[in-house]
Amino acid sequence: MTNVSVTVNGQSREADVEPRTLLVYFLRENLGLTGTNVGCDTSTCGSCTVLLDGESVKSCTLLAAQADGHEVTTIEAMADGDTMHPIQDAFHRNHGLQCGYCTPGMVMAAASYLQENPSPTEEEVREALEGNLCRCTGYQNIVTSILDAAGSMSGAKA
Amino acid sequence: MATTEKYVGSPILRKEDAALLTGQGSYIDNQTMAGMVWMALVRPPHVHATIDSIDTTAAASMPGVIGVYTAADLEDAFPSGLPMVWPITEDIKIPTHWPLTKDRIRFAGDAAAVVLAETRGQAEDAAEAVMVSATDLPVVTDLEEAAKDEVVLHEDLGTNVVVHWSHGGGGDQSVFDSAPVTVQERYTAPRLIPNPIETRGCLAYGIPAAGEFTLVSATQIPHIARVGLSIATGIPQSKLRIIAPDVGGGFGSKLNVYAEEALALALSRLTGRPVKWIETRQENYLATIHGRGVLHDCTLAGTDDGDILGMKFVELADMGAYFQLLTPGIPELGGWVYMGPYDTKAYWYEFTGVMTNATPTDAYRGAGRPEATFVIERLVDAYARRIGMDPAEVRRKNFMPPSAEAFTSIMGLNVDSADYEPTFDRALELAGYDGLRKEQQERRDRGDVKQLGIGLSSYIEMCGLAPSEILGALRYVAGGWDAAEVECRPDGKVVVRTGTSPHGQGHDTAWSQIVADGLGIAPDDVEVLHGDTAVSRLGMDTYGSRSASVGAEALAKAVEKVRAKARTIAAHELEVAEDDLEWADGAFRVSGAPDKARTIPELAGSAWTAHSLPEGVEPMLEGTAVWDPPNFTWPGGTHVCVVEVDTETGKTDIVKYVAVDDCGNVINPMIVEGQVHGGVAQGVAEALYEEAIYDESGNLTTSSMTQYLVPTAGEIPEITQDRTVTPSTTNSLGVKGIGEAGTIASPPAVVNAVIDAVSHLGVNHIDKPASPERVWRAIQDAKGGQA
């Protein structure tokens, strides 16, 4: 067993895990943070996307041990109480989700991307999402949601 | 609070979103129980082989292992095999399908044993340690080869050719011999993998001493699964509860009764422990149903000026290694729409189902109707090219005439209503059709490297499964009704129990809109419960674009019953005759004295306290309706795809996509638009990218999402949408269904566009998916032909 200590959603969390434990299973099974979903075995679908030190990563590509000493943010920490994060709110207003399974990963990927590029074009958003698969929405309303969120987030800062 | 706002028809934001957006979905993998153990399947690395022996000793002694079970160990657990509920002909040959195979492996993914262990990792490790000795047999995955019966999958059946169904023809069949023009084409539709982002999974638990069990499963069909799993496991339906939690997409792949569900129940009964299984993505590719996998020989008979006289389709359909729930019925579902929206004088359709050493096929979004629409629309384009007419003109010339009433079409079923030309005109207008043709000609004249292609697809589909009487005539073993219960609580809130089982379609929201309008309350005061056979007792679930036209109509009927009872109580309280009441501004009001009124929440309180009810009226304001539709519904529409094809590389870019659909009246236009987006995306994927490929040994070579090419946001175009509205005559809501339309319409629109871009080079045919390699080769072959 390996001892892993990670700051998750602002709280210091610690657990003894098998060395082969992936970050996503550490989050889901050790910490009970089941908002991060698993959709494939091959790091393709992006459902498990979280932020590691503020940048998006697929949490199935990292061992929990590799996150030792780092900060992880998951979908559970995006809303502020009952107030959704602007990206979550934009997904709601623009029907950016249907079954919702890819959604946490999409929201986290968007959060990371909009920090990098606060006012992207539609084409840039589509390119930025290439690591996240959705089977319900045809991506159209996801792209619209992220562009909308970019607008409201930059407006809020101004 | 009573409200007068009208909600049906408005883009109300979804009630489902808050939980899903914040990571609080109840998906199967988020569910856990005390004492729970994990199940893993042993899927031996063989495709077609006889099992000589299974050695479980090493696996059984591994850490955490509770048991390793083969078919022999579970002989008593399954009184019957897995159910297939659509024996479409009297002489159909039905292969036995046990949850674990007994003596023979028939496809990559066939399970020969199952392991229970304390953790998922331990179960999967032990499954790998089970030693299956098997002697390989020759493999057949090609349809035409399989039909030769040189390799037979099920020896007791004696043949792979297990079913033949013929529509029997309609109209004057002599046109196929006498018509001035006949076009004959052969089209293939490869197997597709549905790919919901959530794989399958289930959790079985119960009280063995009481014989009671519950299965939580990522399923589209809790009510049907209850019946099917009762048959397979012998647990009486009265003691079997099925729960569908939040389900992460289905697209038909979760419209089934699967081996793993039966195994989890049986092993929970055997061990007394809750048993959980989560499918890996690789298992999803191997063991969850595939779609399509068909081959069509097609004939169109017509005049030389564009009148379609006859359409004839002879199909070979890949059943896979076993029948799943609906396998042989899927081609037949398409068998009723092969005339498309066209007024053909003669109609013929037949298909032959063939077993192969591959994953069983079954319903994948559209189920039979995309297969039909693809070949009709390809054929109409081929006909237009043959006679030198614009494909738009050929279509316009042949549409069935408009009808606001139901009418019998040439295939023999009643179409609920039709008006195809306005939809078609609107699609062409939004696409800028004439301008595109001009630009296409200019590019052709210049010999541009990037050529423009315009693809049309006009479709009809058959939704709203289904009138039970017709299902009976088609030898389907169940009915097609649905049900709803409406319960008005004394706090003014309303609980709805619906028989539909959504997995992304937003029924909580849309059904609330219907109830809100009917009862004069706000959608937020309505709670919609579904997906649990102990909660919504009656239902037939969600598939085949049936939920709105059957399930929501049942709900509308239940609301009517509530209103009738409420009116009786209101008349009693207001001391007037019922006829003196009118429904206005969200309340029953006394005619001429509108201030004397009772709202539904007020009447719900009266009915709950029951202190002073009219004689003969039972307490509680509630209503239940079970509704059997008198007819199917028949949506239609036209999609236009515009592509640029690079004639040097064969690469296709979609530059414009227009979808104009007619799904009748619309409950929530935002949700309808979203359904079209997703449907079109899957159809574009089918047209350009996706194909399940088996090598000669029967191994699936496209065994991951990357190899299979599930498209990303970069590959899917933005869709321009509009609708026309021709209300259905089948239900009072006038709704037709929209869940599958995009997937049905889009593949031929895209492939027709690709061919159209290079047809002036002599290309008449490109198989789907129209990959750059296929397009490039078609261009080279055409050039070679010209040289």
Image (tube, grey):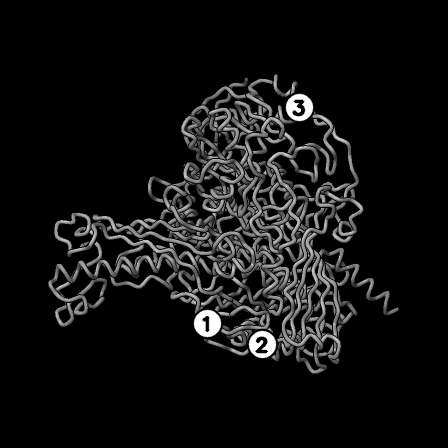
- The one nearer the camera, B381 or B95, is B95
What amino acid is at disc 3? Ala
Instruction: Return the residue at label 1.
Output: B726
Which chain is indicated by disc 1? B
Inspect this view and state whether residue A55 appears: no
What is the crowding at mark 1: few (fewer than 14 residues within 10 Å), some, or many (at least 20)?
Answer: many
Asked whether the residues under marks 3 and 1 belong to the same chain, the reply is yes
Instruction: Return the residue at label 3.
Output: B129
Which chain is indicated by disc 2? B
At numbered mark 1, what does the secondary structure look like: helix, strand or loop?
A: loop
Left or right of B63 on screen, residue B191: right
Position of the C terminus of chain B by quadrant:
bottom right
Instruction: Return the residue at label 2.
Output: B399
Q: Quadrant of residue B67?
A: top right
At numbered mark 2, what does the secondary structure look like: helix, strand or loop?
A: loop
What amino acid is at disc 1? Thr
Q: Is residue B269 above or below residue B476?
A: above
Left or right of B261 on screen, residue B46: right
Furthest residue toward right? B787
Residue B353 x %, y %: 68, 53
Q: Is residue B56 above or below residue B465?
A: above
Residue B328 x %, y %: 62, 52
At numbered mark 3, what does the secondary structure look like: helix, strand or loop?
A: helix
How many marks on residues? 3
Asked whether the residues under marks 2 and 1 belong to the same chain, the reply is yes
